[in-house]
Image (tube, grey):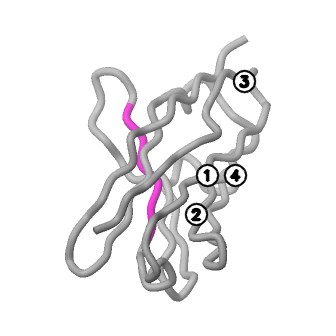
Amino acid sequence: QVQLVESGGGLVQPGGSLRLSCEASGSSFSIYAMGWYRQAPGKQRDLVARITSGGSTNYAASVKGRFTISRDNAKNTVYLQMNSLKPEDTAVYYCKALMGGYAYWGQGTQVTVSS
């Protein structure tokens, strides 16, 4: 099974930047499809960005052009670089791994964008 450990959340001002990290256990990280999701209070959990094992990416329209998902297979880590942050980006961000037909979730990390 896969265990995911997230880090990098925190409090930032509008227009600021954060980089989230998600480190996965196991020796088969390179074949995992990875994604970042977020959930704001009273809202459902929605896809923010996705990256396949082949490196293809896609993004929610609300973050396209501001966020970048990437992966470092040597470090078993996926990143979410978040720039030009807005108050509406405030949410708990979750890392997800898809492997062998199973979905695994990280514990979530809080991102708060406020002045």
Q: Which of 74 and 91 is in front in this view?
A: 74
Quarter of the figure with the C terminus: top right
Q: Are marks 4 and 3 in contact (CB under 8 Å)?
A: no
Where 50 sits versus 62, above or below? below
**Mark 4 to mark 2 CA distance (whole Å):** 10 Å
Q: Are marks 2 and 1 in contact (CB under 8 Å)?
A: yes
- Residue on which disc 1 sits: 21
Quarter of the figure with the N terminus: bottom left
Dot 4 amino acid type: Gln
For discs 1 and 3, the disc positioned in front in the rendered view: 1
For discs 2 and 3, the disc positioned in front in the rendered view: 2
Classed neighbour count for the residue bearing mark 2: other residues with Cα under 10 Å, few (<14), some (14–19), many (≥20): many
| Lower position in the chain sequence, tag 4 or tag 1 | 1
Q: What stretch is highlighted in magenta?
A: 34-39
Residue 44 occupies which quadrant of the picture?
top left
- Residue on which disc 3 sits: 12
Where 14 sits versus 47, above or below? above
Question: Residue 32's spot in the image, x, y percent?
Answer: 42, 77
Q: Helix, strand or loop at disc 4?
A: strand
Q: In this view, does 115 lie to the left or right of 4?
A: right
**Mark 1 to mark 3 CA distance (whole Å):** 16 Å
Question: Residue 82's spot in the image, x, y percent?
Answer: 68, 46
Instruction: Give me the residue at 37% from left, 35% from top.
Output: 39
Residue at the farthest right position: 16
Instruction: Give me the residue at 67% from left, 21% from top.
Output: 11
**Mark 2 to mark 3 CA distance (whole Å):** 21 Å
Q: Helix, strand or loop at disc 3?
A: strand
